[in-house]
Amino acid sequence: MGYDVITDALNNQLTFKLLLILLFLKILAFSLSLGSGGSGGTIVPSLFTGAMLGGAFWTIANLFFPGIVAEQGAYAMVGMGAVFAGTARAPLTAILILFEITRDYNMILPLMFACVLSNVMSNALYPESIFTEGLRRRGFKIRKGREVDIMSSMLVKDAMITYVQTVSEEKSVETLTALMQVSRHVGFPVLDSKGKLSGIVTLSDLRSKVKSGDVDKKK
């Protein structure tokens, strides 16, 4: 899963070269897993990538600003939250996950800033998250956690009913009542003696007949 490597990055136990190698290898492995149709998880690979990226960034920052930057673990932690927030488009979730993992609230402001900035930049570069991208490729357009237009993703033949239950004009209200009790429909086309449509009878029509006691009459 990579938890031990993430811990090493937080504890400043990985070299700059190793951080870069693990970063690119994880991205490659994650891409191959998802691209082949498999499921390699999302949270841990994002946290792993963020830890490697944050640790590598600390090395560069410490090279140019020695003695000013914080510890490598702080950069790795912020990188974890930023990458997950940009990948899943869930900055609040990323912040809470990092708090649960590290139990460290000293990095709250940099972490919140990085997660929000990552989410904004990710949305500007590409509208889909790693979760909604798979749905988009199947024809479902998801925005802000809900369907934008579900009718545009359905075919008429998939929604229409090919077998229609009908009733005859000669049937009584009592017969219609029994039919509605065993059917999931609340309305039926009414056919005349020649099999042609003469009207529609619904549940509200039935209720008016039952109230007046005309259950034996024809519709």
Image (cartoon, rainbow, N blue to C red):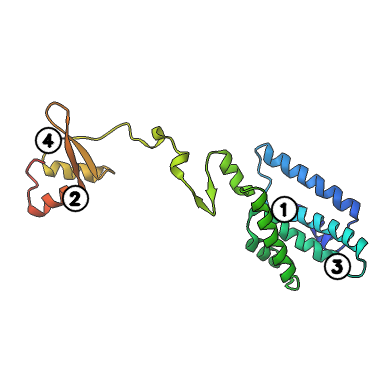
From this viewpoint, which residue is outermost toward the top? 194
Q: Amino acid at mark 3?
A: Glu
- Badge nearest the viewer, 3 or 4: 3
Q: Where on the picture, by quarter, is residue 14? A: bottom right
Query: Badge 1: how crowded within 10 Å, few (<14), some, or many (20+)?
Result: many
Q: From the image, tell me which residue sits under label 2.
A: 204
Alpha carbon of mark 2 to alpha carbon of mark 3: how far?
A: 72 Å
Determine whether, in the image, residue 160 is placed left or right of residue 41. left
Query: Badge 2: how crowded within 10 Å, few (<14), some, or many (20+)?
Result: few
Q: Secondary structure at mark 2?
A: helix
Q: Position of residue 46 (x, y in %)?
A: 72, 53
- Badge 1 vs badge 4, beta-carbon distance below 8 Å: no
Q: From the image, tell me which residue sits under label 4.
A: 169
Q: From the image, tell me which residue sits under label 1.
A: 46
Q: From the image, tell me which residue sits under label 3.
A: 71
Q: Position of residue 98 (x, y in %)?
A: 71, 64
Q: Secondary structure at mark 4?
A: loop
The quadrant in which the C terminus is found is: top left
Residue at 11% across, 28% down: 193
Q: Amino acid at mark 4?
A: Glu
Q: Secondary structure at mark 1?
A: helix
Q: Is residue 196 above or below residue 104?
A: above
N-terminal label among 2 and 1: 1
Residue at 73% across, 51% down: 45
Q: Nearer the viewer, residue 79 or 9?
A: 79
N-terminal label among 2 and 3: 3
Q: Position of residue 41 (x, y in %)?
A: 67, 49
Residue 12 seen in this snapshot = yes
Alpha carbon of mark 3 to alpha carbon of mark 1: how far?
A: 21 Å
